[in-house]
Amino acid sequence: MPQLIVLPHEELCPDGAVIDAQKGVSICDTLLDNGIEIEHACEKSCACTTCHVVIREGYDSLSEPTETEEDLLDKAWGLEPTSRLSCQALVGSKDLVIEIPKYTINMVKEGH
């Protein structure tokens, strides 16, 4: 079973986390199912960039991003060559090390 290694994030996961992930499930759903409340303002429909993550290790094990995802990523804060929308990136057979960026372009968070 692949693991999702989450680097520390000041608000969402201060100590980092190591999560057993299920192949074929999105990174976003895996995070949410394990208590890491990553933003997903469009309800995981590939219409915003609030669930943006940077894949630090294991990027090549993910399927290629769609053109729609790439267009949206161009608007993400802190874009890097290994950036993905976590709602679109499905866990493969390899471990992934991910970093959740400090900021999103979302001006308001629900519940805050």
Image (cartoon, rainbow, N blue to C red):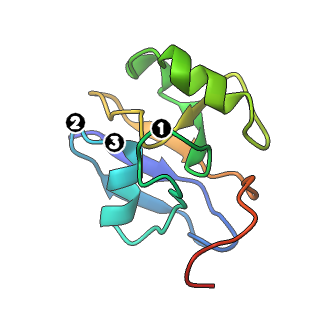
Task: Give x and y (percent) for residue 67.
Answer: 53, 15
Does the residue at mark 2 contact the one at mark 3 (Cβ under 8 Å)? Answer: no
- Image quarter hosting the N terminus: top left
Sequence order check, earlier mark of 2 and 1: 2
Sequence order check, earlier mark of 1 and 3: 3
* Tag 3 secondary structure: loop
Image quadrant where residue 45 sits: top left
Q: CA distance from mark 2 to mark 1?
A: 20 Å
Does the residue at mark 1 contact the one at mark 3 (Cβ under 8 Å)? Answer: no
Type of the residue with mark 3: Ser
Q: Which mark is residue 46?
A: 1
- Identify which residue is drawn at 49% across, 52% down: 42
- Image quarter hosting the C terminus: bottom right
Task: Give x and y (percent) for residue 8.
Answer: 63, 62
- Identify which residue is drawn at 47% across, 27% down: 58
Q: CA distance from mark 1 to mark 3?
A: 12 Å
Disc count in the image?
3
Determine whether, in the image, residue 42 is placed left or right of residue 20. Answer: right
Badge 3: residue crowd in 10 Å (few <14, some 14–19, many ≥20): many
Q: CA distance from mark 2 to mark 3?
A: 8 Å
Determine whether, in the image, residue 71 is placed left or right of residue 42. Answer: right
Task: Give x and y (percent) for residue 82.
Answer: 63, 26
Q: Which mark is residue 26?
A: 3
Between 59 and 53, the one nearer to me in the picture: 53
Image quadrant where residue 26 sits: top left
* Tag 2 secondary structure: loop
Of tags 2 and 3, the one toward the viewer is 3
The residue where tag 2 is placed is 23
